[in-house]
Amino acid sequence: MTVSRINAESLLAIDVGGVTTRAMLFDDVDGRYRFLGVGTAPTTINAPYKDVAEGVRRALERLQEITGRELIGADERLIIPSTLDGSGVDTVAATISAGPPLKVLVIGLLEDISVESARHLATTTYTRVVESIGLNDRRKTEVRLDAILRLRPDLVLAAGGTEGGASQSILRLLEAVGLANYLLPGDQKMEVLFVGNQSIKEEVKDAIGRLGPLHFAPNVRPLLEGEQLGPAQVSLAAIARQIRSQHHRGVEDLNSYSMGGLLPTATAFGRVIRFLSKIYDADKGVLGVDIGASATTIAMAFSGQLWQGVYPEYGLGRGLVELPEHCKMSDVMRWLHLDIPDGYVREVLYTKALYPSSVPATLEDLAIEQALARQMLQLAMKRMLEVLPEKNGFVKFGLTPGFEPVVASGSVLTRAPNHAQSLLTLLDGLQPVGITTLVMDQNHLAPALGAAAAVNPVLAAQVLESSTFLNLGTVISPVGEGRPGTPALRVRVTYASGGEASLDVKEGSLELVHLPLGQKAQLQLQPLHRYDIGMGGPGRGGSLRVVGGVFGLVIDARGRPLILPQDAGKRREMIGKWRWTLGC
């Protein structure tokens, strides 16, 4: 799909991440929009600055040096709109993930229905659920009130009742919220977002509307059979922005630059994944993963329908403090190819939590950081698959669904010493199945384009059509039950030059097939011993055209799920072989 240019307006995209602030410039080049450059600087949301504007200014100064375009005027403010001499920019899009996750109280009727839906809504942005109240909660109102006053949530998500359904039960559950807001000082009152039975909006207003800020969004559970999170996500993002503006200096200025369009980074990232799902294979969908300091974000979209999870507890920053609550240290250490004492692993983990911007200083530190990334990906994917409806047969077995493509982002990947380490981190952490293309967002452009789509959709579409992402390679991962050494897949490659190559791939192996970056080839695939590659069922193969990536064609027959040896020495030896195969 080719998108033609309408009006050539330059656009500046600003992303304030947990560690890094980025300023990205897009403009018209020969009649089409192109990415021109990025300036980066440390994020300054924390001490000593406690003002995101300082980090933004430094990123803009760096972008000025790279592009030669003057962006900051004599008054130290961004030049907008652009001037006749080419200074400044015409429009601004902005995203933010910096700052601690918002503390959320969820309220609903039934734990496995409306409370669960409220939790799912909370996970679509940077939040941490600190308390939940439902019909099965036997605590008295005063005990609930004490809990709320002790935890001081930033936000209450209140769900419950299908359309035209329950009313009085919900109002009773909201009593403690109303009392808490009545007792809290004006600048500490909780924002309340009601996403339940819309027929009782007036009763909810009468009950708690005068006691604190109250917002309404469409019911997240209008029917018992399914959720409807989309409209409520928009309201939640706006409220989250408002809360961050109150807590952190410079956020409101950023929102002003973007004409009120400041978005959570994860929301903008999800937009791009949803857009891509409309132009790729509708049967497989698109997967996006972003391993950041603030959170690990998973976005899955099928034909424009998006499922998204944002997990601050699985971020590579301050959330690492809570890692022992989610997994054992051995779960992280199993991915190490070096013999590193667990005490040192813990030391690196807590150092990273205290200083998220720190970079690995030794090979051991690098191995630990990449092991953490693998584990965070696995934990986040597991959580996401729990809420994803079955989309293909692989989900039934607890495996990752088939996707085309997989878009990966995050500094732990983009700043790795080489692309081979990024590829192996993704293969181990995601364990893709069937046939997919792994692409890497080297410049963290996906959130920028998601935010830009609201003000200049042509720009977003044209930049996505260009070579925005780095194609790491087409990955074929056969799924079966054979023992190591069992023939799993027969591959024949016909190159554009007319040459051919054939190989049989065995269970337990990881293979690379040469196919230069950008070159096309025809593949003939025949699964053996009833292995499944997602082409119609076990034992079924076929042909397809592929385009070479950095690693050509990757055949990952190591097994799904990937099972590592229990013996530490054998495990390190096996991981070492994989690293050698890819050139890590």
Image (cartoon, grey):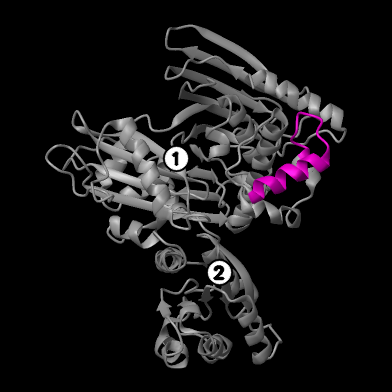
| The image quarter in which residue 264 lies | bottom left
What x and y, as percent, mark residue 65?
A: 33, 32
**Of residues 50 and 526, the one drawn nearer to the viewer in this rendering:** 50
Dot 2: within a 10 Å radius of its alpha carbon, few (fewer than 14), some, or many (20 or more) residues?
Answer: many
Dot 1: within a 10 Å radius of its alpha carbon, few (fewer than 14), some, or many (20 or more) residues?
Answer: many
Q: Is residue 345 magenta?
A: yes
Q: Which mark is residue 407?
A: none
Q: Which residues are magenta?
A: 333-354
Q: What residue is shown with label 2?
A: 117
Question: What is the quadrant of the C terminus in the image?
Answer: top right
**Of residues 503 and 211, the one drawn nearer to the viewer in this rendering:** 211
| Res. 374 in view | yes
Q: Amino acid at mark 1?
A: His
Q: Is residue 461 magenta?
A: no
Q: What residue is shown with label 1?
A: 444
CA distance for labels 2 and 1 = 30 Å
Residue ranking furthest to the left: 84
Q: Contact (CB < 8 A) between labels 2 and 1?
A: no
